[in-house]
Image (tube, rainbow, N blue to C red):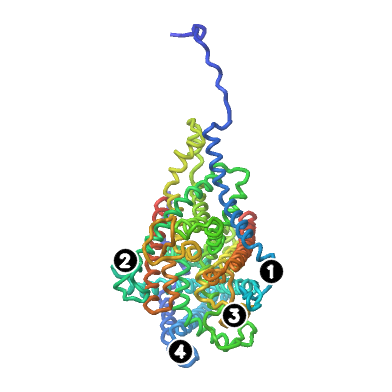
Amino acid sequence: MTATLTEYTGAIPEKRQITNKPRFSDKVFRFIVTSGGFTSLIILGLIALFLLLRGLPVIKDMGFGFITGFEWNPGDPENGVPVKFGIGAMLIGTIVVAVIGLILALPIAVGTALFLTYYAPEGVKKPLTIAVDLMAAIPSVIYGLWGFFVLMSHAVYWEKLIHKYLGFIPFFKMQAPVYERSPFIAGIVVGIMIIPIITAISREVFSQVPLDRIQAAYALGATKWTMIRSVVLPFGSSGVAGGAMLGLGRAMGETIAIYLVLNIYFSPNFQVLFSAGGNVASLIVSKFGEAGEYELRGLMAAGLILFIVTLIVNFLSNAIVKRTSRTGK
Amino acid sequence: MATLDYSSVKPQKPWRLDSKQLALNAGIFILAILLTPVLLNITALNGKLGGAFIFIVLATVGNIVLSLIRQGVKTISTSIAASLIYVATGLVLLPLASVLITVIMRGKDAIRFNTLTQDMRFSQPDAAFTEGGALHAILGTVEIVLIASIICVPLGILTALYLTEIKGRFENLVRFLVQAMSGVPSIVAGLFIYTVLIVTLGAKYSAFAGALALSILMLPTVARTSEEVLKLIPNDLREAGVALGATQWRTVAMVVVPAAKSGILTAVILGVARVAGETAPLLLTILGNTSTHLNPFDGPVAALPLYTFSLMKTGLEVAVSRAWGGALILLTLVLILFITARLLSGKKR
């Protein structure tokens, strides 16, 4: 049975076009997904735009003094008290608290990450990792509550010890013996809150250390610590630095926990044990309730500054982390 | 044929401590425990924490001395580092345990059956525990979180799909922006929604406003976790779909997303867990309420974190106990979400 092609008399279908042009449905799909992908851009843009629009009059009126000024006074036009809004003390306070938190959290977080990657027995690793992740999931209002009612009394005791023995260092001097609600305590609370972030990133970096280098170090006679010092830490240092920056950004944006444990005071204070600190986010929470129209604009401008600062810190941390993962040394 | 008999050779761990050495280690440990109260009396330190501090120092020093005797001076840095690393891990677990234990111990007194069935409409914050409750706050939180998920989940998944399926020209930009968004302080999200909705558009404080603020905070978590999951879907699946003649839209909708279903669910749960406890943005957008209020677009609502926060701020003893109760309910909620996410993601691998 051989049927030849010539016997076929019907119309020969045209050769099918091969095309890589997307169909209509694909075009719609791509459009929707792409526009969905730009949500974050739109939201970030809108945040900056609206806070700027609302806050601009205050920034204009106060000029550069909005960032450098130390006074926050809604004013009293009838009695001739001028309106003055300046978040200088708050910005300094935010940085002071975040840095204290970072100083406390960084060694602990790196130590824990090292423990999780190189020291922990197999059975302990997983539960411990879950415990650290759990720490990140606990709401900040609970940390604030705990910080105020549980940590405060202990922390005051440590503060007294530090003041007694290290009081000669300018940071640990005291104007008056009021230890409660100090930047130091807020720093401890924030430090606890950023430990899981730094630990997670450090662990990630440490687990990427090439096995051959570790084994080479051991083969050359390194002990566990000398191996870590000469292989793991140099490899992971910039990743850890990025994680620390990320933690710093979180610490600067933290609101409720700090509001509960820090005494807001409108003057720059570097005596970290003394009960006077500043925090931009807490300023917004504390003034929001009774603020008039113009003061609200001031708070929005403060929010804008906070937004920009955390964005910059985040940007730097991303750049640092990315550099590690690309070069890998 | 001469074969080696391996059965008699047992794998050995010569570095493992023998029973005598282990006993010495335990001895140091016990000695530290015994010496702690003595030193506690002599020095200026006192209290449980002072005791813990002395114990840690003693145990660490004892271990270092022991390894100094065993292995000599050259490895001293190794043993010091090991001790410090153990101490660091302990310092992480200490606050975690303290937070969990205090919330449970102090919160359990304020939890009665009526806590879950009544609101605070007719009760003062410092009324006895047998009247009033957190029903309004629980319902408010559930409502706000649900609305936030409805807004945020599609956007988050679309962002993740853009990053993994379309891989357009702006892939890196979008990834960077999502990262940047995860760093937006929660108070700024609240302030933004307050500015847009309540100041500019003149809307009222409402659950919807709160949900919008929370969805800003939730979006990066959902998008990033979904992206991680979608990346794990093997490319073979996508190629097979397209090779069978499906359009990209069909492939994604029928093959890729169903394959990543449980992972995306995990992403959503993690997002919810991230925002369920947020207080600051809610303070500026829902204002809080003492009675149950379910209309999401009209009027102030209560939520658990805000309930806890405002009761604590009253400073009254009973109200603070109620606040601990609220914290316990909130913590339970977050824990349930956290464990569910763990189980879901654990099943996949």
Chain identity of mark 4: B
Q: Which residue is mark 4?
A: B40
The Cα atoms of the two marked residues, 4 and 3, are separated by: 28 Å
Q: Quadrant of residue A81?
A: bottom right
How crowded pointer 3 is (Cα within 10 Å; few <14, some 14-19, many 20+) is rated as: many
Q: Amino acid at mark 3?
A: Val
Position above or below: B225 against A31: below
Q: Which residue is mark 3?
A: A272
Tag of residue A62: 1
**The N terminus of chain A - image quarter:** top left
Q: Amino acid at mark 2?
A: Gln
Residue closer to the observer: A226 or A290: A290
The Cα atoms of the two marked residues, 4 and 2, are separated by: 49 Å
At x 49%, y 61%, the residue is B285
Q: Are marks 4 and 2 in contact (CB under 8 Å)?
A: no
**The C terminus of chain A - image quarter:** bottom right
